[in-house]
Image (spheres, coloured by chain):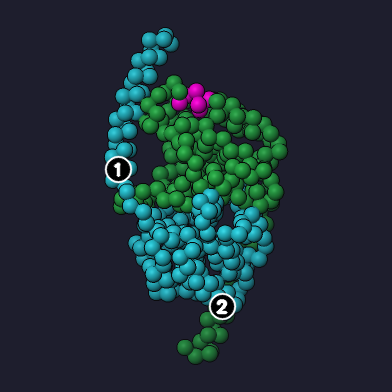
Chain colours: A cyan, B green
Amino acid sequence: MSENDDVARDLAHKARAQKHKQVVDAKIAAATRDKGLLLVLTGNGKGKSSSAFGMVARTLGYGRKAAVFQFIKGAENVGERTFFASHPNVIWEKCGEGFTWETQDRTRDIAAARAGWEKAKAALADPDISLVVLDELTYLVTYRYLSLDEIMPAIEARPEMQHVVITGRAADEALIAAADTVSAIRDVKHAFRDGVRAQEGIDR
Amino acid sequence: MSENDDVARDLAHKARAQKHKQVVDAKIAAATRDKGLLLVLTGNGKGKSSSAFGMVARTLGYGRKAAVFQFIKGAENVGERTFFASHPNVIWEKCGEGFTWETQDRTRDIAAARAGWEKAKAALADPDISLVVLDELTYLVTYRYLSLDEIMPAIEARPEMQHVVITGRAADEALIAAADTVSAIRDVKHAFRDGVRAQEGIDR
């Protein structure tokens, strides 16, 4: 390719980029508000809880506080807990004792879920906490351990600038309707189906 | 509801949970391998980069090393960089100077992308690094700054147990075919379209 071709290509790129910049700039100019967001990360794919933990890291990067409630995860310590739980700006609560088909004890699971929810409610009322992660909360609704009639008022009454991230499969339509940002994570493929177990640092 | 109803409900739950446990246990028993995974997080929804940063936290939780290459992000410091970049087990490289429609300078963008890719290649050859994040790499392929013919051999030749996470919209079909785990993150709704700008701790 000659030098002239390069120059022409660069100019064409610049023209396209300028046009794109106008569109993006207009969108950015229209988005001026700050707001405490309710985010829902749902779907069957990999990346719901890990995304929430990425937002914990971002929050800590600004010197703010985060509270994480893990409603379903088992008793074992995993990477995210080892890494974050000892941080002075993090509250980290394991509220469940494993997936419900592991414990096979509905009464105990409900008690653990309710005890966890009471602690989460306290975080949702605390203006010093910038981010509240309700990890795998959707399963509590699906299993009818906790109803949205109890969950939504606490979320709606939270401090104005507090962000809330809810993760888990099959998020209820009412939760999706109430959220500001919703991502549905589709499982295109997963190494688990090729016989690879949960990998440290990736899945746990 | 009488006490008998409660007992009946608990027993029914236990029976369902036992059946589910058998199915899950069989799947877990079939997944026994460890493998360095190639993960691709694509789609237009919120949660691709934040998910990768959650996996950085998990990796650090096991005392392992992570390397992050941000190919498109702008010059400003954001939460994830402030939080992770000073960690002794983290390599953090900003390889771009903003989205390409911001700079409008194709030649400079290509140079920045190539310089970043050379550093990423070194990480992909280093068995001490447990996780390599190639954040927003897909755009380099889309804009033809870098070809998959250059990218794939370095990924395929990496240390056996090293995990790689690639994020960005519109991942190439060849990249998806080569990956072990792929999530397509659908933008169901995003606060940006309601006039809310990127929020610290959530989007940056």
Residue type of the residue flagged with mark 1:
Ala
Nearest the camera: A7 or B77? B77
Q: Position of residue A186 (x, y in %)?
A: 46, 50
Q: Which label sits on residue A111?
A: 2
Mark 1 against mark 2, which lies toward the viewer?
Answer: 1
Specify the segment rendered in magenta: B109-114
- What residue is drawn where x is 70% and y is 49%? B63
Q: Position of residue B11 (x, y in %)?
A: 57, 80
Q: Chain of mark 1?
A: A
Q: Is residue A25 above or below residue A185?
A: above
Q: Height in image: A4 above or below A151?
A: above
Q: Is residue B204 left or right of residue A20?
A: right
Cα distance between the residues tagged 1 and 2 = 48 Å
The foreground one among A178 and A87 is: A87
Which residue is the site of mark 1?
A: A29
SS under mark 1:
helix
The tag earlier along the polypeptide, 1 or 2, is 1
Q: Residue at x 30, y 52 (%)?
A: B194
Any part of residue A174 in sight: yes
Q: Is residue B186 inside the magenta stretch?
A: no
**B23, A77: nearer the viewer:** A77
